[in-house]
């Protein structure tokens, strides 16, 4: 409780409420696979974190608390305005949802509600990484509320993205650092995704 109170008073975006998730233990096991694999964004303090742990209060499975490493200040990026963080409609789902093995990226289409296409996660992540030199690179990130349920039965992880051109008040050097930090995480995830 002290952990929650301390974090909550400083940054409520790092306390994720899981009480709407029916199969909580399944969701907890699923999200723990991605601990430290994506950057996590907090709109209330306009920061994102590359070095953190995911914690669950003992005896309570309705809240997850993300704790940035206080000794790794260089792994916290400041001045990341909320307008630069965009929902993608992309969800990572376990293969069991599709009666398959592994992890998949489910792509939903805005102009075609109800239509979604699953792609194995590793090649999907590789495509994201291949945008590294593009003018508008795809920079995935997590934010509060991204742990959800897919079809009310299986956990899924929604992805946000950082749109570099929407970042305000930071230098080109800082934009480049944001991009490289996220792509470093993506590269690490690609190496281990088959074992998750």
Image (spheres, rainbow, N blue to C red):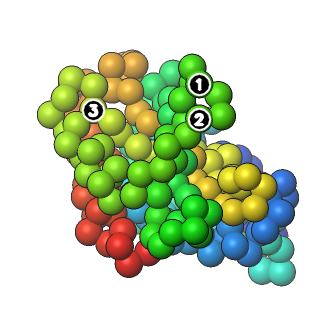
Residue 69 visible in image: no
Q: Quadrant of residue 139?
A: top left
Query: 100 above or below 13?
Result: below
Q: Quadrant of the N terminus?
A: bottom right
Residue visible at 27% across and 32% down in the picture: 137
Q: Earlier in the sequence, mark 2 or mark 3?
A: 2
Q: Is residue 115 left or right of residue 193?
A: right
The x, y position of residue 155, in whole percent, is 66, 61
Residue visible at 45% across and 70% down in the picture: 102
The x, y position of residue 180, in whole percent, is 23, 45
Q: Are marks 1 and 2 in contact (CB under 8 Å)?
A: yes
The x, y position of residue 117, in whole percent, is 49, 43
Between 75 and 89, the one nearer to me in the picture: 89
- Kindly report the distance in space between the C-alpha atoms of the residues bearing marks 1 and 3: 24 Å
Label 2 crowding class (10 Å Cα cut-off): few <14, some 14-19, many 20+? few
Q: Secondary structure at mark 2?
A: loop
Label 3 crowding class (10 Å Cα cut-off): few <14, some 14-19, many 20+? some
Q: Are marks 2 and 3 in contact (CB under 8 Å)?
A: no
Which circle marks residue 173 in the picture? Answer: none
Q: Earlier in the sequence, mark 1 or mark 3?
A: 1
- Kindly report the distance in space between the C-alpha atoms of the residues bearing marks 2 and 3: 25 Å
Which circle marks residue 112 in the picture? Answer: 1
Label 1 crowding class (10 Å Cα cut-off): few <14, some 14-19, many 20+? few
Which circle marks residue 115 in the picture? Answer: 2
Which circle marks residue 137 in the picture? Answer: 3
């Amino acid at each position: 409780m002290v952990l929650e109170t301390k974090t909550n008073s400083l940054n409520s975006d790092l306390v994720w409420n899981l009480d709407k998730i029916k199969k909580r233990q399944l969701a907890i096991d699923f999200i723990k696979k991605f601990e430290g694999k994506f950057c996590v964004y907090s709109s209330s303090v306009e920061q994102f974190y590359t070095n953190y742990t995911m914690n669950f209060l003992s005896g309570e499975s309705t809240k997850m608390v993300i704790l940035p490493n206080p000794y790794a200040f260089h792994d916290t990026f400041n001045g990341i305005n909320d307008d630069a963080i965009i929902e993608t409609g992309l969800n990572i789902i376990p293969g069991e949802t599709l009666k398959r093995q592994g992890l998949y990226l489910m792509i939903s289409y805005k102009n075609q509600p109800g239509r979604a296409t699953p792609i194995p996660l590793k090649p999907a992540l590789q495509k994201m990484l291949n945008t590294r030199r593009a003018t508008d690179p795809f920079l995935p990130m997590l934010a509060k509320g991204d742990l959800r349920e897919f079809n009310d039965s299986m956990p899924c992880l929604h992805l946000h993205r950082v749109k570099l051109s929407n970042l305000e008040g930071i230098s080109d050097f800082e934009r480049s650092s944001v991009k490289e930090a996220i792509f470093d995480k993506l590269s690490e995830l690609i190496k281990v995704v088959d074992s998750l």
